[in-house]
Each structure stands twice: as structure tokens, then as C-alpha cells.
Amino acid sequence: MTQENEVIVELLIDVLGNEKQHYESKGQISFDCPVCAQEKGLESDGKGNLEINYIRGVYKCWACSETNGTQGPLGKLLDHFGTKQQKKTYELIRPSEEFVREKPKVWARLPEGYKKFEDSNIRFIPHREAITYLYSRGITDEIIQKYDIGYTVTGDYAYRIIVPSYDMDGKLNYFIARAWTPKKMKYKNPSVPKDEIIFNESRIDWTKDVYLCEGVFDGFFLPNPIPMLGKMLSENLFTTLYEKVQGDIHICLDGDAWENSLRVYHNLNGGRLYNKIKILKLPKDKDVCDLKGKIDEYYYEIKW
């Protein structure tokens, strides 16, 4: 083995842990896949499915490459999972290999004890309390079924309504957990960077008008919603809107967030999206959920 390849192997072990198999003559070495482990919520899945050829500078996970795209130039793998120093070391050894400057995907897992309401026993008391809360917010059985709304009474998210989110490939990427009892903090959400996800993107029809709102519950009452999970427009959502949306964009933030609505409007109303942005000015103490989606009278014309 050349000195260069010895350094690369040591580097890979530092990043990925102990190798499972190593064929020096082929320059082939295998490890547990960090993406598989991350998806399962484990430090290591023990399968050794990540295969690397350090002579050719490529890698592939035989378990998740099709679903998660875990394959490509070795620089991409190190860019995702290595430290700055480890990436720099590899760049010095293989300066001709282009690093892929993408952020690693982080996958969410549904909380312990999650059950869909449609699969639950109506006589189970916590279930009845949770469903009563949803009905009090105007959320119908049709909405509950459409959005796979569920609940849990165990673990870190006990006694919370769970609304899962799925990406364009139908893969879970986030969820919101809303307490139905006033004794608990209102929301407790997973430790996934929400700026990097688009909530329930699998349900968005980019050929039609889209409706930006603050919260997931607001989105239940809009025809093609995109909950921003806050009052600010993330860079990822801005880019996706600019690239994908074909209809108009309706800004439907809460009544107490008028300044934020204007900021979103001015951020979007340019280039290809010019004159395609519509904005609502709701009463200060109201949101879309309060109004059950009856928002037509609140459209506001921006005068220049």
C-alpha cells in the first residue's frame, strides 16, 4: 500500500470507526454506514454495508444508496461526516477531487408510542382527550386522516398530538408535537434543523398557488399549504419557491406578524416571482386556524 493510501485509510478510520473488511490489493474497505445508523437512531448499525474504494476515490452503501443517495466521490462522504481538518487533509492528498458542498441529511424518527388516530381505540381515554382537543380546534376526521395525525402517551413526547412531515420521496423528515394539556409546554419538536426541511413537501402541488403560513395547524385550513414553522422565510424555502412554484404565492401569517409578512413579501416579490405574491393582513388577535381558512376578505394591496 502506498503512503498516500495509508493516510487515507487512517483518515477513514478516524471518521467512520473500525473497518469491517479490508482488501488492500483492491483498495477496498468497508464500514458501518453512518447514514443507515443515523436513520435508525443508532451510533452504529453493525452491518458494514458502506463500501469504499480509496484507490478510485468512490463509496457506496449497499443498503441505502438507492433511497438516500449514499454514494459518489469519497470527498462527498468526508464533506458530510468529517471535521474541517479531516477534509483539509484529504484535499491535500487528492487535490483534483471536487468536494460536494452539500449539508448532510438529518432524518427524523417518529416518537415512541406514536399511533395514528384512525388506528386507535376510541375508548382509550388519552385518545379521547386528544381527539377532543383537535375537534375543539375545528380539525375534522378528514383532516386527521389526510395528514396522518396521531398521538403518543409515552416517552419524551407523551400526551402530545403528532403531525408527521414527509419529503418529496415520501421519507419522514420532521414532525411537530403539540401538547393537548395546558400543563405541558405547548410545542416540543425534534432536534432536526427545521430551516433545512420543507414541511410535508410530498403534499405540495408546485403547479398551483401555494399558501405560506406560520404553523402546521394553520395549514390544515389552506388549500395548498407550506407551513414555515415560524415567521421567517428560510433560505432553503426561498430557493425552492423561486425554482419550483408556478402559481401565485399567498402570504398568510398571523395577525400579530404583519412586519414579518411585509418582510417575506419584499424578499419574494422580484425576478421571476414579481407580481405573483399576494399578502393577507389578518386581525391582530387572529390566525388562519382561528378563521378556519375564511381569509378572502383579508387580502391587502401593497401600494408603491
Image (tube, rainbow, N blue to C red):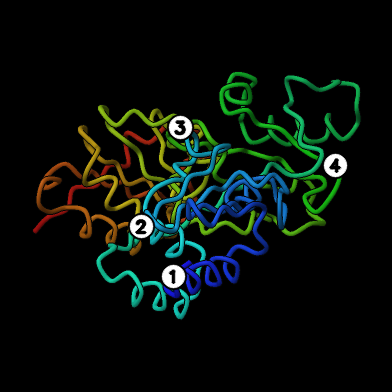
Q: Residue 96 in the image: x percent, y percent?
A: 25, 66
Q: Nearer the viewer, residue 39 or 7?
A: 7
Q: Which residue is the site of mark 3?
A: 169
Q: Which residue is the site of mark 1?
A: 2
Tell me the distance, in whole angstroms, between the alpha carbons under discs 4 and 3.
29 Å
Q: Is residue 200 visible?
A: yes
Q: Which residue is the site of mark 2?
A: 233
Q: Earlier in the sequence, mark 4 or mark 3?
A: 4
Q: Is residue 268 found left or right of 65 in the rendered image?
A: left
- Dot in front, 1 or 2: 1
Label 1 secondary element: loop
Q: Quadrant of residue 256?
A: bottom left
Q: Is residue 71 found left or right of 165 in the rendered image?
A: left
Q: Residue 152 in the image: x percent, y percent?
A: 80, 39
Q: Earlier in the sequence, mark 3 or mark 1?
A: 1
Is residue 174 shown above or below 129? below
Q: Earlier in the sequence, mark 2 or mark 3?
A: 3
Label 4 secondary element: loop
Q: Which residue is the site of mark 4?
A: 153
- Rendered residue at 63%/28% (across/down): 148
